Image (cartoon, grey):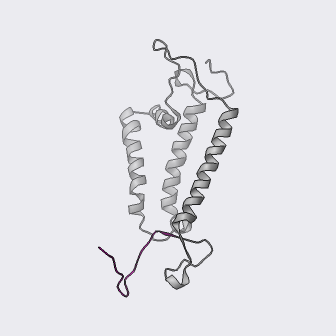
Amino acid sequence: MSHHNHPGEKVHGLMGLIPGRSTRWEAEETQWAMTWPNLIMREWVALLAALGVLMLVSLFFDAPLEGIANPAVTPNPAKAPWYFLGLQELLHYGNPLIMGILLPGVAISALMALPYLDRNPSSRPRDRKWAIGIFTTVVVVFGILTVIGTFFRGPGWEWVWPWQASGH
């Protein structure tokens, strides 16, 4: 089955705008670059550069591994992986139902609903201050909770300064 363009019909394709050019949508005033190879090759180069840096760092720094696991001995404190430490820290401050399920659920739901609640068509940050403010607040709060759980919690989940001996 062939597809024919009719006069006046808009045809859409996978393209990207070239920086520094007009962003108007009239074809005669807009400079377009095809996504392949222009964008995809740049992304591949960035991926390979990041992978190379990660491999170099792994040559000079060992992973912080502990001894062989012993199911009879529980470490104190028993910390979650870093990506759950913000949630573990949040659980420390109140009721597990509220702090572990409701509050994170509301935060994630709010972030998912944000694009639908902020109907501003502008892509300029100064025109979308409340949406950017909500997103930034949620990310910073969970980031701070993760840092506290990672560096400031010791045995018994007590507050420990990073430069103090934590006993493990």
Q: Is residue 47 magenta?
A: no
The structure residue drawn at horizontal position 48% and vertical position 55%, both measured from the top left corner, is: 134
Q: Quadrant of the N terminus?
A: bottom left
Nearest to the observer: residue 77 or residue 20 = 20
Q: Which quarter of the figure has residue 10?
A: bottom left
In the image: residue 52, left or right of residue 12: right
28, above or below 89, in the image: below
The structure residue drawn at horizontal position 38% and vertical position 56%, both measured from the top left corner, is: 113
Pinpoint residue 166: horizontal percent, then vertical percent: 62, 21
In the image: residue 29, left or right of residue 11: right
The structure residue drawn at horizontal position 61% and vertical position 54%, both measured from the top left corner, is: 45
In magenta, the rendered stretch is: 1-15
Pinpoint residue 132: horizontal percent, then vertical percent: 51, 59
Pinpoint residue 65: horizontal percent, then vertical percent: 59, 24
Q: Which quarter of the figure has residue 94?
A: top left
15, above or below 150, in the image: below
Pinpoint residue 6: horizontal percent, then vertical percent: 34, 85
Q: Is residue 3 magenta?
A: yes
Nearest to the observer: residue 109 or residue 33 = 33
What secondary structure is the stretch in magenta mostly built from?
loop
